[in-house]
Image (cartoon, grey):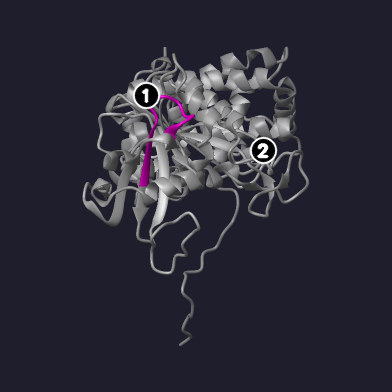
Amino acid sequence: MKKRIGSYPRVRTEGGGRAVVSQAGSVLLVETVRRAGLDSAISAALTPWRKARAVHDPGKTLLDVALAVALGGDCLADVAVLRAEPAVFGPVASDPTVSRLIDTLAASGEKALRAIRAARAEARERIWQLTQGKAPDAGGTVTVDLDGVLVIAHSDKEDAAPTWKRTYGHHPLMGFVDHGPGGTGEPVAALLRPGNAGSNTASDHIAAAQMALAQLPKKYRRGRRTLIRTDSAGGTHDFVAWLARRGRWLSYSVGMTITDTIHQHVLKVPAPAWTAAVDADGEIRDGAWVAELTGDVLDGWPKGMRLIVRKERPHPGAQLRLTDADGMRLTCFATNTTGRPIAALELRHRLRARAEDRIRAARATGLRNLPLKRTAQNRIWLEIVQIALDLLAWMPMLALTGKARLWEPRRLRLRLFSAAGQLVTTGRRRILRLARHWPWTSHITAALERLALLPNPG
């Protein structure tokens, strides 16, 4: 008797299967586009760039590329994944048509970028209204995190330059709305910069903050309800003064570099002035304390600014820096928020680390590299990446519950979007049947039911 050896069963494969749909779970993103009104908003915004007798709408073409990026694509040619499934995605433009559109929009410069961003802002306001208690402004406040991202260039591209990490590429400055512990985040700013752009450039932080504020509903574009949060790269006089300017009245929580003046003030803080730091669950953080610095250390900074310093025992094996003191690791940030304990303010600032998760998701969604040659083209690509990230944030916010709402893009693709289906036509209706044995089919169907209950735009 001959015994078969092997870990996996042998399956015969052949082409010619009919009515089989790959990436069937991506209908979740298509429905999100529809409920957000993003398709009509972008089509209307890009009407000036539609040529007479054009077959493909520029807005639909741009959205198709964004959907391909959301599904894991990292170049314009990956729109072929959508072109292969016309029953789900409709007619999709050819690769040359897509390339010509990107070139046309890039040649228009800021005009095209403003049109795309206006459409995104319109859809964002609608999504926040639809999600109500799940929206990032459910608590009456909005938090925007600004952070830089290093994007390595593997070939010679316009404005690519050596970076501070001794790599070669670009150094975009990104902005993300924080959804809090019960959600993810969504991009609201992407400022493309050369690789050698300075981390502490105040003008770049101001430009990124302006982009981010323009993406928010109008009532959050000024006032204390909007918090701008950065690491020490934003701790410059010009940027803090811009945030605190009269009439803008934004809240801020900005990391600060430990200067010699701050270091000397920390050494003079009496022991009773130190307060125990807290963790996210409200428990006291062992080996960490916070204190507020006052006096001439605030000279030259905007009125109302508070300087809060934190000291903590370094982790085993960590090396101390010259700015540390008495064997303690020191960090510092500035804020203009009053009426809250300094331990709570320090915890709020420390939660800025969630921006690193948003950056990781962006790298997995088209930001691993900038695929185009010229800077103007890559600015359009950054907008496409942001649209893809918007959809990956909006869909869970609208349709998923429990732990599934926290799934990052890679897990969404693996478990939901990659599900296969069969397209069945009965009468005049087309039905997409998902595999019954797929463990996450119930997640997809339940999410589609929630999306179907939402009102249509307009």
Seen in the picture, residue 450 relative to 266 is either above or below; the reply is above
Mark 2 residue type:
Leu
Q: Left or right: 156 with respect to 314?
A: right
Mark 1 and mark 2 lie on one chain; the one further toward the N terminus is: 2
Q: Is residue 168 visible?
A: yes
Q: Which residue is at the front of the view, 453 or 349?
A: 349
Please identify the residue farthest to the bottom as the structure is shown: 1
Q: Left or right: 16 with respect to 256?
A: right
Mark 1 residue type:
Trp
For label 2, the SS is helix
Q: Which residues are magenta?
A: 298-309
CB under 8 Å between callouts 1 and 2? no
Q: Which mark is residue 47?
A: none
Seen in the picture, residue 152 relative to 223 is either above or below; the reply is below
The percent coordinates of residue 168 (x first, y second) are 70, 50
Image point 68% across, 43% down: which residue? 195
Q: Which residue is at the front of the view, 205 or 388?
A: 205
Q: Which mark is residue 76?
A: 2
Depth-wise, is mark 1 or mark 2 nearer the camera?
1
The percent coordinates of residue 89 (x first, y second) are 54, 31
Q: Which residue is at the front of the view, 402 or 431?
A: 402
Q: Which residue is mark 1?
A: 128
Q: Measure the C-alpha gap from mark 1 to mark 2.
A: 30 Å
The percent coordinates of residue 180 (x first, y second) are 34, 38
Image point 53% across, 40% down: which residue? 233
Seen in the picture, residue 458 relative to 79 is either above or below; the reply is above
